[in-house]
Amino acid sequence: MTTPWDDWNHILKIDPDKELPEGVTYGDLCATGTDAIEVGGTMGITEENMSAVIEACAEHDVALYQEPSNPEVVLEDNALDGYLIPTVFNAGSPFWITEAHKEWVRLEGELDWERTTTEAYIVMNPEADVAELTEANCDLDADDVGAYATVAEHMFGQEIIYVEYSGTLGDEAVVEAAAEATDESTLFYGGGIHDYDSAYTMAQYADVVVVGDLAHDEGIGAVRDTVDAANDA
Ligand SMILES: CC(C)=CCC/C(C)=C/CC/C(C)=C/CC/C(C)=C/COP(=O)(O)OP(=O)(O)O
Ligand SMILES: O=P(O)(O)OC[C@@H](O)CO
Ligand SMILES: [Mg+2]
């Protein structure tokens, strides 16, 4: 089976709760050469701020995905290419592994399965909002992460495995272990990518690098450098 993310090297994750740098538009971000825009964040996400970003990106020619942090903010919008739904493998509460998902199905009934894919998160930065919210056990070494990746792919059939260091650049050995453990699944890496070199380093191991805060903190040029690195690696 081929999936869109088979061909991706770079994702730009836009947080609807954060401002853009002075003079930068959503259109500028869509035109950085990134392969896909993922709209999501942990804190401060509402239907209103989500739909504002999705509307602004919809008119541009780039793959557009929503990454909802809870069932209440999922938007039915034909402008979306799909929904990337996190499940946190090392969460401290089952709510973030399967229970939020159960609630979503219970409330919605039939979902748009064609456009819905899970991302098997392994959350690694204990300081990140996502780690606090999900009470993730981040005390994992490279072996643990490799084993989680194997479980995600071979036992749970996950198409996407996401090593998440949101806010800080991760340990190369951990990302390498996840890369070695994955076979058919697509490995996403995100966290702390801030320039060409950091993007290149992680893109050597990960199939796709995810860039988040840089888009909100720096200009378009900085994001473009990470796209170049992801494509070069
Ligand atoms: C079942 C449905 C529809 C949703 C549940 C989805 C789950 C399990 C969410 C838990 C993990 C989560 C909140 C993921 C959101 C994406 C993410 C990790 C964003 C990065 O967040 P941070 O960078 O830590 O937070 P902020 O940037 O918002 O501070
Ligand atoms: O914001 P940064 O640290 O780039 O992280 C990107 C992404 O993995 C967050 O979910
Ligand atoms: Mg963030």
Image (spheres, rainbow, N blue to C red):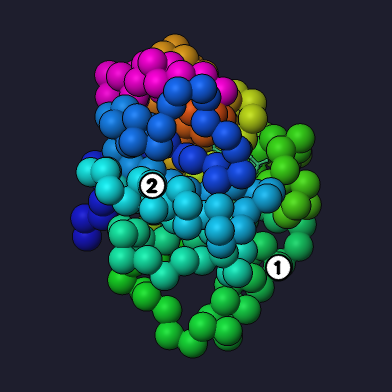
Q: At x 42% / y 61%, what residue is drawn?
A: 83
Can residue 217 be seen here? The reply is yes
Relative to the observer, which residue lies in front, 29 or 169?
A: 29
Specify whether 28 is left or right of 4: right
Q: Quadrant of the C terminus?
A: top left
Q: What stretch is highlighted in magenta?
A: 217-233
Mark 2 is on which residue type? Answer: Ala
Query: Is residue 137 at least partly visible in the picture?
Result: no
Query: Residue tagged by mark 2?
Result: 56
Vertical order, 25 against 163 (above or below)? above
The residue at the point 45 percent across, 23 percent down is 23
Q: Position of residue 117 (x, y in %)?
A: 41, 62
The quadrant holding residue 48 is: bottom right
The tag on residue 95 is 1
State which image quarter holds ligand 2: top right
Q: Is the magenta stretch mostly helix, strand or loop?
A: helix
Q: How crowded is mark 2: few (under 14 residues within 10 Å), some or many (20 or more)?
A: few
Where residue 173 sits: x, y (%)?
56, 25
Q: Which mark is residue 209?
A: none
Front residue of 85/74: it is 74
Left/right of residue 175 with respect to residue 231 in the rendered view? right
The quarter in which the N terminus is drawn is: bottom left
Measuring 76% from the left and 35% from the top, which residue is drawn there?
A: 127
